[in-house]
Amino acid sequence: MIKRLNALLLSALMLAAPAVAEPLRSVVSVELLPGWRKADGTHQAGLAITLAEGWKTYWRAPGDGGIPPVLMIESDESVKMAQALWPTPVIFHTGGMRSVGYDRSLIVPLLVTPNGASTDIDLQGQIQMGVCHDICMPVEVGFSGQLAAFDRRPDARIAAALADRPLSAREARVGAVDCTLRPEKDGVHLTARIEMPTAGSPEESVVEVPDQEIWVMDPTTTRHGGILTIETRMEYFGEGPLMLERSALRFTVLGAARAVDIRGCAG
């Protein structure tokens, strides 16, 4: 079976990307870190993505100037679910465009839920991703390995990547999160007002929605005292009316000191 994680399909260019050609092997490589079986029966693995000096790649929500990653897991029925837990990214401003990603090698923790706590997992998959230096190009890299059921020893590299994820709203002491949606021609204007301590100046943000047929513009982020205001415009390219649930909105605040992951808002 094939499970698509973060199914953000780029375009015909991304879909047509071949496996990594020989010259690109010196640019990017991906290794499956087998990790360890946790006490709750899930398996904490990781993907080690190694980039050549000067190259960068993109986060799950890469912004208008980025290429979204597509992670595909192939396995038998031993896997019930798998989830990529992306570490905190940085924001790039290049040529008037904003993108969100990584300018260094990284480890993406991969939380796998097996169908049986004592089941070994032979895991394989591919990741389609964009890599950029002077030019940007889509690549596809495969990975494979066994996740042993009785290996309980944590991998310090994966543990460090887990610690590098954005804080939750509770951890960051986020208060009320209120959203206003104002209909506009061919779209909606969103204003979110968030009670939260500063994440460190400058603060920028990313807004995500689960519907891939909704395009979210890069937001503006301003602060007045204890209130962070995020504004953006959304356009819908599907059929019928735009249906947007406030509980499904996701805000990531990226500051100089920390990052914060906020799920949902009231209105």
Image (cartoon, grey):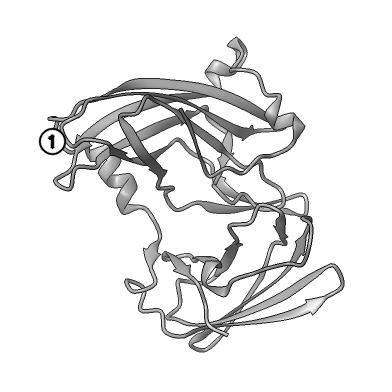
Tag 1: Cα neighbours inside 10 Å, few (<14), some, or many (≥20)? some
Q: Secondary structure at mark 1?
A: loop
Left-right relation of 119 to 65 = left
Q: Identify the residue shown where x is 46% and y is 25%.
A: 125
Q: Is residue 159 visible?
A: yes
Q: Measured from the top left, where is residue 98 in percent x and y?
A: 69, 54
Q: Assign the C terminus to one quadrant of the image.
A: bottom right
Q: What is the quadrant of residue 173 in the picture? A: bottom left
Q: Nearer the viewer, residue 251 or 136?
A: 251
Q: Measured from the top left, where is residue 119 in percent x and y?
A: 20, 29
Left-right relation of 180 to 27 = right
Q: Nearer the viewer, residue 197 or 73?
A: 73
Using the image, determine if residue 29 lies above or below residue 211. above
Which residue, as the protein is rendered here, is positioned at the far bottom? 225
Q: Identify the residue shown where x is 30% and y is 29%.
A: 78
Q: Identify the residue shown where x is 65% and y is 33%.
A: 133
Residue indicated by mark 1: 152
Using the image, determine if residue 1 lies above or below residue 68. above
Q: What is the quadrant of residue 123 in the picture? A: top left
Which residue, as the protein is rendered here, is positioned at the far right? 185
Left-right relation of 216 to 187 = left
Q: Measured from the top left, where is residue 110 in percent x and y?
A: 36, 40
Using the image, determine if residue 21 lies above or below residue 182. above
Q: Measured from the top left, where is residue 221 in percent x and y?
A: 62, 73
Q: As shown in the figure, which amino acid type bears the numbered disc 1?
A: Arg
